Amino acid sequence: GGVIIRVAGKLLDGSTRSKLDALKKEIAMK
């Protein structure tokens, strides 16, 4: 799913991207 997140990140604005990164970190910790 990493590629999808990366592609989506390019389409999103900065603030949404920051939230997505925070979400990715939470998922990675689990």
Image (tube, rainbow, N blue to C red):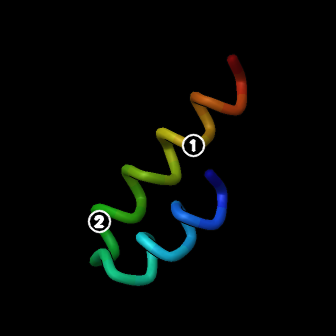
Density class for disc 1 (Cα within 10 Å; few <14, some 14-19, many ≥20) is: few
14 lies left or right of 26: left
Residue beneath the point at 57% across and 70% down: 6
SS assignment at label 1: helix
Q: In which quarter of the image is residue 16?
A: bottom left
Query: Residue most toward the bottom?
Result: 10
**Residue 7, image x, y percentages:** 50, 76
Query: Residue 26: x percent and y percent?
Result: 58, 29
Q: In this view, does 15 lie above or below 20?
A: below
Mark 2 or 1: the one toward you? 1
Give x and y (percent) for residue 21. 52, 53
Q: Residue furthest top?
A: 30
Tell me if residue 25 comes above or below residue 17 in the rendering: above
Q: At 44% from the left edge and 72% from the top edge, which residue is drawn?
A: 9
At 28% from the left and 77% from the top, the residue drawn is 13
Instruction: Specify which label sits upstream in the sequence, 2 or 1.
Output: 2
Label at residue 9: none
Residue at the disc numbered 2: 15
Q: Quadrant of the C terminus?
A: top right
Element under disc 2: helix
- Classify 10 Å Cα crowding around label 2: few (below 14), some (14-19), many (20 and above): few
Q: How far apart are marks 2 and 1 (CA)?
A: 14 Å
Q: What residue type is labelled 2?
A: Ser
Q: Nearer the viewer, residue 18 or 5?
A: 5
Q: Position of residue 27 (x, y in %)?
A: 60, 29
**Callouts 2 and 1 close, C-beta under 8 Å:** no
Residue 10 located left or right of residue 11:
right
User: In the rendered view, would you say 25 is above or below 2?
Assistant: above
Residue placed under numbered mark 1 in the picture: 24
User: What amino acid is at disc 1?
Assistant: Lys
Q: Judge from the rendering whether residue 14 lies leftward or rightward of residue 7; answer left or right.
A: left
